[in-house]
Image: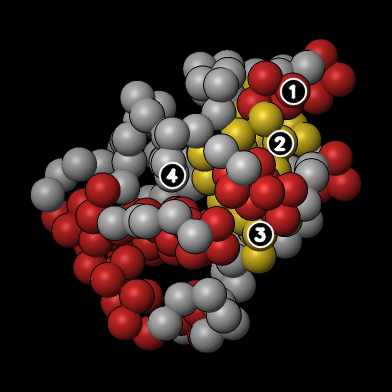
Amino acid sequence: MQFLESLKKNKMLSKAELLICFEAARNHVIDGAVTVNFEGRKRKVKTTRELIEFEFSWIIAEFTVAKELGLNYDPKDFNKFRNRADLGDDIEVRWTPYTAGHLIIELNDRRQDNAVLVTGHDYQIRGYMPIREAMSDVYWRTTNYWIPQSHLSPIDELKMVLSNG
């Protein structure tokens, strides 16, 4: 129940929007688009329920960033698998349950995108960084790049970039 209680802290999404997110996550798992053994998630989830909650959290994070940036978002259009940006033409959303978590960039991430970090189950947007800047030796940690929150630019700066086109 701690997971559901923490959802009440999300100020960006309405109850109706959260329900849409949950239905999208549930359907995504039921349709077999992702399984408990899916690469990248198998270390994090062990049951179907945990998988639905995990997918639900990612969808909420994307929807939260979309609303903050004034972008259209369809929760059913989740999981692009790095073929295209999560939002708009060039925005990748990264979520971690850890409030003090880092922005993690993978080697196969698209360099032309901007990565936005969302943390915790209250889905706080912590900032963003262009992926090409994040892929610096300074942030390299064995298999991927870890960017501390203190190195991220405020989300308002990305809003200005988007509004100036």
The CA distance from mark 4 to mark 3 is 15 Å
For numbered disc 4, what is the local secondary structure?
loop
Q: Are marks 3 and 2 in contact (CB under 8 Å)?
A: no
For numbered disc 1, what is the local secondary structure?
helix
Where is residue 83? Give x, y as percent: 35, 24
The CA distance from mark 4 to mark 1 is 19 Å
Under mark 1, the amino acid is: Glu
The CA distance from mark 3 to mark 2 is 12 Å
Q: Residue at x 43, y 41 (%)?
A: 88
> Which is nearer the eye, 129 or 139?
129
- Left or right of 45 on screen, residue 124: right
Say which label, 4 or 3, has the lower sequence index. 4
Say which label, 1 or 3, has the lower sequence index. 3
Q: Residue at x 38, y 61 (%)?
A: 56
For numbered disc 3, what is the local secondary structure?
strand
Residue where numbered disc 4 is placed = 87
Q: What is the image's colouring?
A: secondary structure
Q: Crowding at label 3, few (<14), some or many (≥20) Cα neighbours within 10 Å?
A: many
Name above or below for residue 78 compared with residue 49. above
Q: Are marks 4 and 3 in contact (CB under 8 Å)?
A: no
Residue where numbered disc 1 is placed = 133
Q: For the C terminus, give its image quadrant.
A: top right
Where is residue 129? Give x, y as percent: 71, 36
> Which is nearer the eye, 53 or 134?
134
Q: Nearer the viewer, mark 4 or mark 3?
A: 4
Residue where numbered disc 2 is placed = 129
Q: Residue at x 31, y 82 (%)?
A: 16
Residue where numbered disc 3 is placed = 125
Under mark 2, the amino acid is: Met
Where is residue 66? Give x, y as percent: 47, 57
